[in-house]
Amino acid sequence: MKLILCADDFAQSEAIDTAIIELIEKNRLTAASCMTLSPRWAESGKKLTASIRKKASIGLHLDFTHFGDAISHLKLILLSFSHQLSKSRIKHMIHHQLDAFEATIGTAPDYVDGHQHVHQLPQIRDALFEVLLERYPNNLPWLRVAKPPISDGLKGLIIRILGSNAFERKAKALGFAYSGCLLGVYGFNGSSEDYLKRFKCWLANINKHNATPVLMCHPALQMSHNEEDLIYPARVREFGVLASDELTRDFDALNLVKSPID
């Protein structure tokens, strides 16, 4: 029963960074996705020490909608599907984020995914493949395919139709390793007990998937509330569940891995 357990949004805030590091140290995570456009990135990246990297894959959380020269997610979707994005601009943004990753970490990312799954959108996915093949021809990072199960409802369906099949086909054709389905999709609503039930349900369904799935999460510690982080209460609930003794048996039964090919 293999699973990659991945926390998104590293470097977005101190509360997020501290939670992710603590969960990696507790062997509750095997991957962390980094936002290298964040003003915090150079400082945050120093926390990803050699001992942390032994426990978890560290990847690029490709960002077009949050930090830097960002646009809204909806606008990005509309522009990408109508092929109105500048290819040179997309490639520049990808190179810029990879440069920042390498400058702080000292290596290429172990994998690449996308904030709000933007790495799978038309135009962006093609530019991403070109850049990765150009930069890392002999050591390609693995890729996270954001393809939730059909049972995940409307939100999961929307994520699937925004490019998951095309992204997966091209990754396979170009020789990239990639993950199986994406677990962890929900509306960031409900109580801690609700999240615990969801989490146990995701774990119970791992064996239904052929390739190694990724279960994404968004943990944060309870600190001064950042009003701009709309899902902050859900982040705190997720951390409480992931760090709890309630899941000890479940984690003991898992084969947590750092990549789809471990």
Image (cartoon, rainbow, N blue to C red):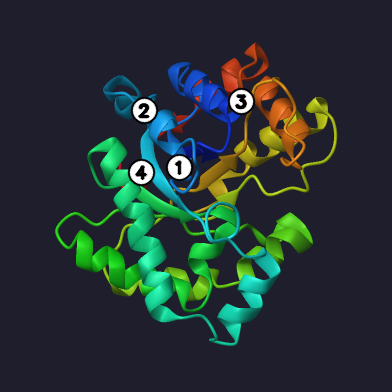
Q: Position of residue 26 (x, y in %)?
A: 48, 16
Label whose residue precedes the other's in the sequence (4 or 3): 3
Find residue 15 and name its label: 3
Label whose residue precedes the other's in the sequence (2 or 3): 3
Residue occupying image coordinates x 61% and y 25%: 15
Label whose residue precedes the other's in the sequence (2 or 4): 2
Find residue 259 and name its label: 4
Tag 3, which secondary structure?
helix
Residue 99 versus residue 8 in the image, above or below: below
Residue occupying image coordinates x 67% and y 64%: 72
Q: Position of residue 21 (x, y in %)?
A: 47, 23
Q: Are marks 2 and 1 in contact (CB under 8 Å)?
A: yes
Find residue 48 and name its label: 2
Find residue 34 and name its label: 1
Type of amino acid at the residue the image marks with label 1: Cys
Label whose residue precedes the other's in the sequence (3 or 1): 3
- Asked if residue 149 lies left or right of residue 253, the reply is right
